[in-house]
Amino acid sequence: MYLILAVALLIGYSPVYLSTYGFSDDWFYLYASTTDASSIFKWDILSGRPFYGAIRYFFAFLIDDVQDLTYLRALSLFSLILLGGYIIRFLERRSIFASAVQRLTFATLICLLPSFQVFVGWTVCFPYVLSVLLAGISYSTLAENKGLGRVLLSAICLTLSFAIYQPAAMSFLFFALLDLGMTRNNYQRSAVIKLMLMLGFGMVLAKVLPLVLFNEVLARTNIILAPLKKITWFIAEPLRNALCNFDTGRSIVSIIISCSLIIVGIVKAPDFKPRKAFLFLFFLLAAGIPNLLVSEDWAAYRTVIALSLITTSAFIAGLFVIFNKLKITTSASIVCLVIAVLSCMLNIQKGFSSPQQREYQLLSSAITENVPAECSGQLYYRIDSDNLPAVAKSKKYDEFGSLSLGMPWSFAGMADAIKKEHAMKFSLPKAPVIYGSDQCLGDCLTLDATHVLAPGK
């Protein structure tokens, strides 16, 4: 069963280790790792992610070129396989679902969600899967055992999870929902209170730590109280993404089908009582707290991981109810897995690997054709338009299909990689990106983004 899970994920995520590419912040990470690794750590602490910063800082000394990014993505995929195995074991120990086939299907489908596709396909997100795994370990430690030592261990795991990535740490509620809402046990209110207190502890610590260390935080992490505006946005963006689970097109049909199956999954849960439906809604709202409280109004797939895990759990449970009624559990589960694996593969290929390889080729051609090999002057890059030519056929937020060469922090890393590849002598200034009609001064050359991305235009 665990082998089947691993094979399915290795196939679905094959573009991340069979393709050599960098995407957006990957290029900044690669460049900073050879020029100013400490800047990586400070930025992540100011973002409230000190453990994430420590992990990235450590691996910064182990990467030297774009090929090395592949190893970090492979590490993220390995973490995801471990998480899938952990979920299967979690389901087995609590007798959730009727058969091993359903548990395998559930864990594999969960690991193929778009949020995990971003975690694995985007190199700088490689520690995020670990955050989800730590949240699960924290919940199990807190729920299954008593004693101060276990509570402290749970708190440490959850704190580390929050210190990697706060939205992923909220996956603590996903494991709580499985345990309290999808088993035959009737949960006690005190258990929910204990869980929320533990979550609150982790959230507060993630907010306080950057203030203690640097006496500042990034503006996007500031708390804002605008309930009506944020709730409207929450429904239209994060919640909609979560309800559409595997459909990144976010169609109305997907929402209707998903909501119907979610209702079936909740109502047909073992020993269903209205309080279990309330628990689902409560956890769903609680999982969205980081999105609702901070000033950043961004609903990218990496930020809605906890919401997606909660909605998709009920969605898959609803599917199983229908499969059981029709007595097609095994065959239908296989079909679902094949579709999800192929969808994952295509999403990563079309959203990350192929367009990013094309961008690298375009910049490489522009540099080798316009910059003499012996030129020792400085190379600048002008972003001359707000609507640069697209490379990918579609775009989802700053993730799937986003344009790396449209982001000012990507150019230096990409240009430096090309310089090393072709043994060129040009140099890069501290701020190599200019805008509009700005000109570089002295011994320098400038490449225009529009000409790079659309040669001949």
Image (cartoon, rainbow, N blue to C red):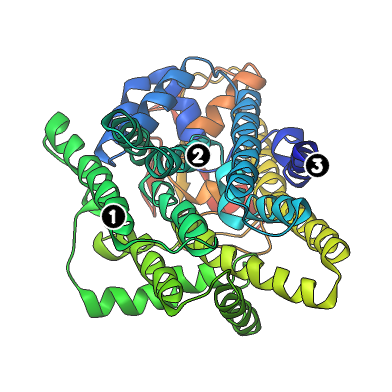
Instruction: Tell me which numbered mark, 3 or 2, is placed earlier along the sequence.
Output: 3
The image position of residue 157, as x and y in percent, is 37, 34
Tell me if mark 1 has few (under 14), some (14-19) or many (20+) residues whose alpha carbon lies within 10 angstroms of its own.
some
Above or below, 438 relative to 41 = below
Say whether marks 1 and 3 touch (CB < 8 Å).
Answer: no
Residue picked out by circle 2? 133
Q: Could you say whether the residue bearing mark 2 is in a helix, strand or loop?
A: helix
What residue do we see at 83% from left, 57% from top? 338
Residue 60 is left or right of residue 259, and the answer is left
Residue picked out by circle 3? 4
> In which quarter of the view is residue 439 placed?
top left
Which numbered circle lies on residue 164? Answer: none
Above or below, 122 relative to 195 = above
The image position of residue 199, as x and y in percent, is 30, 49
Residue 257 is left or right of residue 267, and the answer is right
Dot 3 amino acid type:
Ile
Tell me if mark 3 has few (under 14), some (14-19) or many (20+) residues whose alpha carbon lies within 10 angstroms of its own.
few
- If the image is split into quadrants, where does the N terminus sit? top right
Dot 1 amino acid type:
Met
> In which quarter of the view is residue 46 placed?
top left
Which numbered circle lies on residue 196? Answer: 1
Can residue 393 be seen in this snapshot? yes
- If the image is split into quadrants, where does the C terminus sit? bottom right
Above or below, 69 relative to 357 = above
Which of 107 and 113 lies nearest the eye of the viewer?
Answer: 107
